Image (cartoon, rainbow, N blue to C red):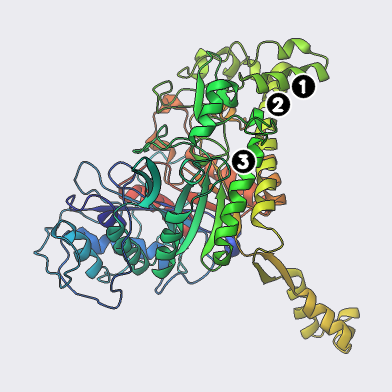
């Protein structure tokens, strides 16, 4: 149970919640997940203590072995470590109010006295050692329970599977946001690992549970504290400890701040020198129609503006990723499996249209368009003039789009009948607004590819399906030129050479947000303000995923643990319908898709919802 290792040692018993997504191309898919400390994070590492020592003490929280059973069902399938391609999954672990609630087991069993033979742990961390010693006690596979909801969406083609996939899925668990932290000593700041000893046990525990690897935020505000000077000291230590434990790394280039999103329990800002530029020129930040500046990330409107000592934001992103590649390219592939590129708030490709952290937005408000900084307004004005409607670019976004907490029927722009979103102006504005987001993603992925896929970065040979099919036909004695090629050594050599293509050993990743509220309305209002021009009659994810496919990147999508019936009817939510749409679009575009749970969940039904997708 990773939460038992990563949360406060006195908080016992612990709980684990497991969730999985869907991968259109399972052979190239990866998984992502999160480990949640109290709230959403707190942890660190020690040295690689004795993985060879396997004490067999009684489990302190009897729900542990059943938790581990469900986790292993998801991670390992019928048995053994991840056995190959089989969709993608996500695990979150956490505890709530000091009490255990479970996704995959009953938590009512009484705990037993604990015994440990280790002496290198303080008494306050004895629970961590006990759980580590007992992780191998795993009961038999359990069947999935029936759906939590009686009013299953009749339009959904999803059926509950009686068992998870027999081959399992690769699972990554997200480490706490503040695993790497800044401390100040004698007037200087240093990056350090928090609770290093506890994190070492956590990593060993995850390995025993069958987890493939961990996801780690590489915070811009921690790494580049001075312009052009990069400190990866703590991350080098962290990555070494992860790989020593037998796990892989998904590194997230986090070009945003922490503290303003659901579940954030720590505060990490953008680099101070970036904020200083923002103090002088606040238009570098996203701005709403009331003039509020969102300092969580830089506005995409200034992507190509040399405002930071002669560098543009795209230069800043590229330079940090290039420095990361220089430090860690020897780990690309076998140890660092993916680099996910942050592209907006919470690292997701979207606008900060629903900022809950400062109280401006509450679920299920439609949100607000974020296009009122000087750079976005200037581009909107140019585009309006280009289509001979200069009046469309005079006042920023739509005047009738309501406010953050409006409902669809409160805002004329989003109304299902007669809403302005269906007008000629509405189509112009939404095409421009979503198009700017797509251009931003394309530019950042181009910068990332240049930084991470240079001539010196590792490559991995992979077989191409078309050549394999051709060789199979030849071996079966197919008629025609293919059969003749078998008798030509030169042609055989050419075919064998063509059988392999060199691909980057480390994959690029992109996060898409699961904006599921108002998805059952015609306008899909919340998706529109977030930057996804997706309505009942227009697929807004197709163009994004086709662009991502051109970069050979992967996508992680949230809200895979949710069911429609779990949400208030008036919010017109459809996380199931949205997930199915994204799965279909990703499959059509040939983009590998992984899943991530959006919220902390501690119940059977959230786990089973994920397992359904892996078993289908």
Task: Tell me what residue is drawn at x 55 percent, y 57 percent.
Answer: 338
- Element class at badge 3: helix
Q: Which mark is residue 10?
A: none
Task: Give x and y (percent) for residue 450.
Answer: 69, 52
Q: Nearer the viewer, residue 544 or 131?
A: 131
* Left or right: 272, with 341 as reference point: left
Q: Which mark is residue 432?
A: 2
Task: Give x and y (percent) for residue 273.
Answer: 52, 33
* Left or right: 74, with 5 as reference point: right
Q: How far apart are the alpha carbons under marks 2 and 1?
A: 8 Å
Q: Which mark is residue 383?
A: 1
Tell which tag, 1 or 3, sits nearer the viewer. 3
Tell which tag, 3 or 2, sits nearer the viewer. 3
Q: How far apart are the alpha carbons under marks 1 and 3?
A: 27 Å
The answer to whether the residue labelled 1 contacts the one labelled 3, judged by CB atoms less than 8 Å apart, is: no
Occupied quadrant, residue 6 = bottom left
Task: Tell me what residue is drawn at x 52 percent, y 21 percent.
Answer: 293
Earlier in the chain: of badge 3 and badge 2, it is 3
**Taking the image as drawn, is residue 481 in sight?**
yes
Task: Tell me what residue is drawn at x 88 percent, y 90 percent.
Answer: 487
Q: How far apart are the alpha carbons under marks 3 and 2?
A: 25 Å
The answer to whether the residue labelled 2 contacts the one labelled 1, judged by CB atoms less than 8 Å apart, is: yes
Q: Which residue position is annotated with label 3?
A: 316
Instruction: Please identify the quadrant where the N terminus is shown.
Output: bottom left
Task: Give x and y (percent) for residue 396.
Answer: 65, 15
């Amino acid at each position: 149970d990773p939460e038992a290792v990563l949360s406060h040692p006195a908080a016992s018993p612990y709980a684990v919640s497991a969730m999985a997504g869907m991968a259109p191309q399972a052979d190239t898919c990866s998984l992502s997940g999160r480990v949640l400390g109290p709230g959403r994070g707190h942890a660190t590492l020690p040295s690689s203590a004795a993985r060879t020592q396997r004490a067999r003490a009684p489990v302190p929280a009897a729900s542990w072995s059943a938790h581990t059973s469900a986790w292993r069902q998801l991670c390992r399938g019928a048995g053994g470590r991840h056995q190959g391609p089989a969709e993608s999954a996500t695990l979150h672990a956490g505890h709530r109010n000091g009490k255990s609630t479970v996704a995959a087991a009953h938590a009512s069993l009484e705990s037993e006295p604990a015994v440990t033979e280790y002496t290198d742990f303080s008494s306050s961390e004895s629970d961590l050692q006990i759980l580590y010693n007992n992780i191998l006690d795993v009961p038999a596979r359990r069947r999935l329970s029936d759906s939590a909801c009686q009013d299953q969406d009749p339009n959904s083609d999803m059926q509950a599977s009686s068992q998870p996939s027999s081959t399992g899925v690769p699972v990554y668990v997200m480490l706490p946001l503040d695993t790497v932290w800044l401390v100040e000593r004698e007037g200087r700041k240093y990056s350090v690992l928090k609770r290093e000893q506890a994190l070492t046990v956590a990593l060993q525990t995850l390995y025993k549970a069958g987890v493939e690897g961990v996801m780690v935020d590489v915070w811009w505000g921690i790494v580049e504290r001075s312009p052009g000077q990069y400190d990866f000291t703590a991350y080098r230590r962290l990555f070494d400890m992860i790989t020593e434990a037998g796990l892989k790394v998904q590194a997230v280039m986090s070009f945003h701040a922490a503290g303003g999103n659901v579940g954030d329990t720590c505060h990490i800002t953008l680099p101070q020198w970036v904020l200083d530029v923002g103090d002088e020129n606040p238009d570098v930040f996203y701005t709403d129609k009331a003039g509020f500046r969102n300092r969580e990330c830089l506005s995409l409107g200034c992507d190509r503006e040399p405002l930071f000592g002669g560098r543009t934001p795209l230069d800043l992103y590229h330079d940090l990723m290039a420095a990361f590649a220089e430090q860690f390219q020897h780990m690309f592939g076998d140890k660092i499996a993916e680099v996910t590129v942050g592209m907006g708030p919470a690292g997701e490709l979207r606008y900060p249209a629903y900022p809950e952290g400062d109280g401006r937005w509450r679920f299920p408000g439609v949100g607000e368009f974020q296009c009122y900084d000087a750079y976005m307004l200037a581009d909107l004005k140019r585009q309006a003039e280009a289509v001979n409607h200069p009046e469309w670019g005079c006042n920023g976004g739509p005047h009738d789009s309501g406010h953050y907490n409006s409902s669809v029927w409160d805002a004329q722009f989003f109304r299902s009948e007669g809403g302005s979103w269906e007008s000629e102006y509405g189509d112009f504005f939404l095409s421009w607004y979503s198009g700017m987001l797509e251009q931003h993603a394309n530019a950042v992925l181009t910068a990332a590819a240049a930084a991470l896929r240079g001539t010196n970065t590792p490559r991995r040979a992979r077989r191409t399906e078309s050549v394999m099919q051709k060789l199979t036909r030849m071996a079966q004695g197919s008629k025609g030129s293919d059969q003749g090629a078998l008798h030509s050594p030169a042609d055989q050599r050419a075919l064998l050479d063509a059988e392999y293509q060199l691909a980057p050993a480390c994959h690029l990743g992109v996060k898409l947000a699961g904006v599921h509220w108002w998805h059952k309305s015609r306008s899909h209002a919340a998706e529109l303000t977030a930057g996804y021009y997706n309505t009942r009659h227009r697929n807004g994810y197709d163009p994004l995923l086709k662009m991502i496919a051109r970069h050979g990147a992967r996508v992680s999508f949230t809200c895979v643990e949710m069911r429609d019936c779990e949400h208030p009817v008036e919010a017109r939510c459809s996380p199931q319908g949205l997930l199915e749409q994204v799965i279909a679009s990703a499959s059509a575009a040939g983009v590998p898709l992984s899943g991530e749970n959006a919220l902390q969940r501690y119940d059977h039904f959230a786990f089973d919802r994920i397992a359904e997708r892996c078993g289908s």
